[in-house]
Image (tube, helix red, strand yellow):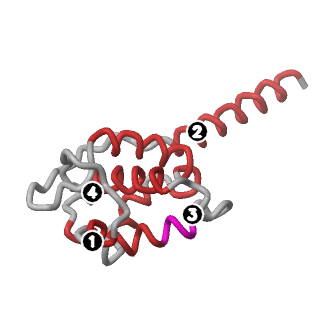
Amino acid sequence: MKKSLIFAAWGISLLFSSVASAQTPEAVPVVVNPNLPALYTEEQATAGGEAFAQSCGGCHGADMIGIFATYATGKAYYDFISAGMPMDQPGSLSPRRYLSIMAWLMQQNGFPAGDTALTDSPANLNQIIPTDAVAE
């Protein structure tokens, strides 16, 4: 009986550690394409990686990096996530947090960082063409 409790506790701790690690974005080598627009800052992308881990990673994991590239424009992606995510509390994050998550996804997809933070202006977001990204 004691051994089965130990194994059960060990199995539960493995389960929780694997769930926690699935939520944290992994550092993946990214090839930056200097021909893409630099529309976010490194600081914004770093904050976005943390926000992604807290608000998105539990459901999406690393799959979100590739999903970003399925949108026609950054505006289309921003409009979707800012109205519909996270699924259990749609639209509950601040615009700044949604933009930082987007900046992290841009970084992970090969968009270069710049000196100006990403904003939610349609003119700014429409410059982002996710399919132009070089990361896989």
Q: Which of marks 2 and 4 is nearer the N terminus?
A: 2
Mark whose residue sits in front, 3 or 4: 3
At label 2, counting other C-alpha atoms closer than 10 Å, the crowd grade (few under 14, some 14-19, many 20 or more) is: few
> How far is the residue under mark 3 from the one under mark 4?
20 Å
Q: Does the magenta stretch include residue 83?
A: yes
Mark whose residue sits in front, 2 or 4: 4
> How far is the residue under mark 1 from the one under mark 4?
20 Å
Q: Is residue 7 left or right of residue 64?
A: right
Residue designated by label 4: 109
Q: What is the three-letter code of the residue carrying label 4?
A: Asn
Q: Earlier in the sequence, mark 1 or mark 4?
A: 4
Residue designated by label 2: 20
Q: Earlier in the sequence, mark 3 or mark 2?
A: 2
> How far is the residue under mark 2 from the one under mark 1?
37 Å
Q: Is residue 40 magenta?
A: no
Q: Which residue is drawn at 31% across and 78% down?
A: 72
Mark whose residue sits in front, 3 or 1: 1
Q: What is the three-letter code of the residue carrying label 2?
A: Ala
- Quadrant in which the C terminus appears: bottom left
Mark whose residue sits in front, 2 or 1: 1
Quarter residue 73 falls in? bottom left
Mark whose residue sits in front, 1 or 4: 1
- Quadrant in which the N terminus appears: top right
Where does residue 47 sit, x and y in percent of width and height? 41, 41
Q: Earlier in the sequence, mark 3 or mark 4?
A: 3
Q: What is the three-letter code of the residue carrying label 1?
A: Ala
Q: Is residue 70 left or right of residue 90?
A: left
Residue designated by label 1: 123
Residue designated by label 3: 85
Q: Residue furthest top?
A: 2
Range covered by the magenta-colored residues: 80-85
Q: Which of marks 2 and 1 is nearer the N terminus?
A: 2
